[in-house]
């Protein structure tokens, strides 16, 4: 079945996930607008509309979202690690809260958010910021899809491959199997397919759909 064309706004469209998913959405004939920081329009994939703005200003974002039915929020700290706890609050959480409030104000029909697999034994500050962002979606009464990957393998993001034997061993132990699945690795292709699927197959109005690692891996679009 041919997907219904969407009018999508993407924050973080110049990043690791953003450029790839923008290209896939354009290939599926969706109308894509990239919301980006001033001076970065040259990094947006060809074919997308571009709006330069302050990604932490609720009013500017709301104005840019008028007429859009979907927003995909991808703003976040690059290469997160435990030493960036303050940045997770200042960038990841603050931008998500501003975008959620703006989406509610602009009456956007569907909010797609990339969170993180949880619970986990590491990256506590990162997980806390993303969980708080998820709660902001509920507080703003948004119809939402939340994707929870642990680590997305792709160009420049390959080091966790060495952990694959450990994941395989853990999956054979009943007490560790659920954690190994929840914190499993996904590829950039799997993640972008899942994002496109999430956008093209929104949940019912008022609902929040969660896609964990197994659902991300199973996405086919």
Image (spheres, grey):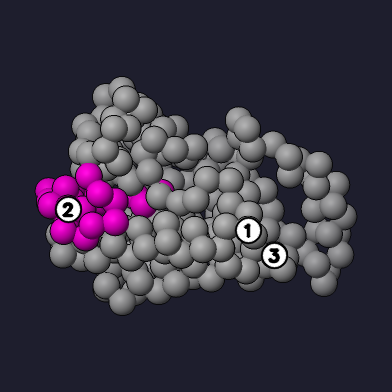
Query: Is label 2 in a helix, a strand or a loop?
Result: helix
Rendering coords of residue 33 (x, y %): 24, 38
Is residue 217 visible from the viewing direction of this image? Answer: no
Q: Which residue is mark 3?
A: 122
Point 25% across, 49% down: residue:
54
- What's drawn in magenta, residue-wise? 53-74
Q: Position of residue 72 (x, y in %)?
A: 34, 50
- Counting from the top left corner in percent of width and height, residue 215 is at 55, 54
- Which mark sits nearer the N-terminus, 1 or 3? 1
Are circles 3 and 2 on residues that touch, CB within 8 Å?
no
Mark number displayed over residue 60: 2
Q: Which residue is mark 1?
A: 83
At numbered mark 3, what does the secondary structure look like: helix, strand or loop?
Answer: loop
Q: Is residue 86 or residue 65 the one in the foreground?
A: 86
Q: Quadrant of the N terminus?
A: top left
**Could you tell me if residue 37 is visible in this image?**
yes
State which mark lies toward you, 1 or 3: 1
- The verdict on residue 6 being magenta is no
Q: CA distance from mark 1 to mark 2?
A: 31 Å
State how far apart marks 1 and 3 are (Cα): 12 Å
On whether residue 71 falls in the magenta region, the answer is: yes
């Amino acid at each position: 079945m041919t997907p219904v064309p969407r009018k999508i706004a993407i924050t973080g469209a110049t990043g690791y996930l953003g450029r790839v998913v923008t290209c896939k959405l354009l290939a599926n004939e969706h109308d894509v607008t990239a919301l980006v920081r001033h001076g970065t329009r040259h990094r947006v994939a060809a074919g997308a509309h571009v709006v330069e703005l302050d990604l932490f200003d609720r009013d500017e974002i709301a104005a840019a979202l008028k007429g859009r039915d979907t927003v995909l929020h991808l703003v976040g700290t690059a290469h997160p690690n435990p030493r960036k706890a303050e940045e997770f609050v200042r960038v990841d959480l603050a931008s998500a809260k501003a975008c959620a409030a703006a989406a509610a104000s602009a009456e956007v029909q569907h909010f797609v958010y990339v969170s993180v697999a949880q619970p986990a034994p590491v990256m506590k500050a990162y997980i806390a910021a993303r969980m708080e962002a998820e709660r902001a979606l509920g507080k703003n009464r948004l119809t939402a899809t939340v994707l929870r990957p642990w680590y997305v393998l792709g160009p420049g993001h390959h080091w966790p491959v060495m952990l694959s034997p450990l994941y395989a061993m853990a999956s054979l132990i009943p007490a560790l199997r659920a954690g190994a699945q929840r914190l499993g690795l996904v590829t950039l292709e799997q993640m972008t397919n899942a994002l496109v699927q999430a956008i093209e197959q929104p949940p019912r109005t008022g609902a929040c759909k969660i896609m964990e690692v197994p659902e991300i891996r199973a996405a086919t679009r």
